[in-house]
Amino acid sequence: MSSFVDFRRYRGLTAVGIPVVLLACAVNQLLLMTTGPSPAWLVPVQIPMYWQQIEIAEAKVKGLAQATYSSTGEDLPFLLYLGMSTAGEGIEPRLLADPESFYGNRVVGLCGAGGSMDRFRSLADPLFRYNIRPQLTLLCIHAAWLVGHPSKAPPSSLSLLEAIRLRNVHEFRSRLFWHAWICKNRTSINHAIRTFLFALRIRLDIIPADRGPWEAPERHGFPVYARPDFLRYQLDNLQGYGWFDANSYALHQQSQGDALRNIIQELQKRGSEVVIVLMPEQSEIRNKIPTVARNFLEQTLATEVDGTVLPIWKFVDAIPDEMFSDYFHMNDAGRFEFSTQLANRLRTHLASKVIPTIGQ
């Protein structure tokens, strides 16, 4: 074999590669020993929203600020619905348009991805940065967001010898993975770097504005009915996050509830009326989510925020299972049915009161 391959040509690479690998291992071990497997200053409590969604939201809101600005000081009135993918897939803005209303055809949907109040707050941040002032805002949420997407906590022990003694291969692999500090925390490192660069781009005002802020949020193209393997995958993920465990809500609901209250306060501070829309859910998921989740959410929202008791529109069981693509996302039939119900509720609400213009 040596007559065909000249190994001498690789000696230089080996001489450089081995020290580099040893240095990386030493740095990894030093970081593990000094900061722990999951340092709180680096790893967020909740898994952040995807950067693509953050970029889209920033561009859309910047475009909205330009589209609604008036030199007279009275902004162009519009209706805003704020939510995640369930709102993006489940609401047809054309059906919410009403020529007789204060907003006419000016309906804006700002929708992200995932399900946590922390992500919801990240989605809303550009609205407050550009001082967007919708006359009416629909917050389209789910009670399970009070758990959200918590980051995985490290095991109580990282001892590999203990796992070997227990003859537990799965536990050994899990602990070995936690020993790889750089690999385990690379996503959080990337997120910290991108957060810094994103803040710098905002400061330099170099993020391009979306020229079509009135367009409907882009949909993901879910099928009429998801495949069984996808449903199992989705269910496993939700269970992994702790959405079906009452104890998970005790750990996260306070901080997630605070994030929701902060959004409401910021909107009200800008003169917007806020309405809570509890989004439809497929019956199996609806039955799995603990009662404590909805009780805490309603208790949180029943508390006056800036002297106002918020209207809560409950559509949790408004859509039959056959109108869902998966456990949370409605298909085309579900979108039409829910949007029609939401539009009717909206018109009834508007008929009962006069929405003041911003500045009055």
Image: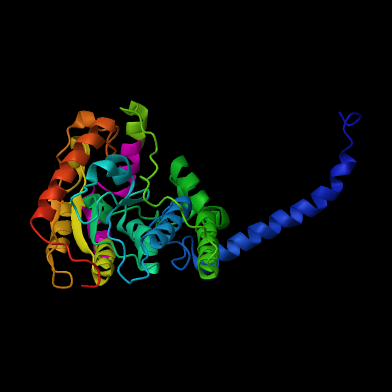
Outermost residue toward the front in this view: 72
For the point 36% across and 31% down, the residue is 230
Instruction: Quarter of the image for the N terminus: give it.
Output: top right
Residue 286 against residue 26 in the figure, above or below: above
Magenta residue span: 234-255
Is residue 99 rendered to the left or right of residue 54? left
Of the pair 229 and 161, the residue shown nearer to us? 229
Of the pair 360 and 284, the residue shown nearer to us? 360
Residue 241 among magenta residues: yes
For the point 88% across and 42% down, the residue is 9
Residue 321 in the image: x percent, y percent? 20, 31
Q: Is residue 168 visible?
A: no
Q: How is the image coloured?
A: rainbow
Residue 262 among magenta residues: no
Outermost residue toward the right in this view: 3
Please identify the quarter of the rendering in which residue 70 is found.
Answer: bottom left
For the point 65% across and 61% down, the residue is 26
Is residue 141 rendered to the left or right of residue 18? left
Instruction: Quarter of the image for the C terminus: give it.
Output: bottom left
Of the pair 99 and 20, the residue shown nearer to us? 99
Residue 27 against residue 90 in the figure, above or below: below
State the predominant SS element of the stretch in magenta: helix
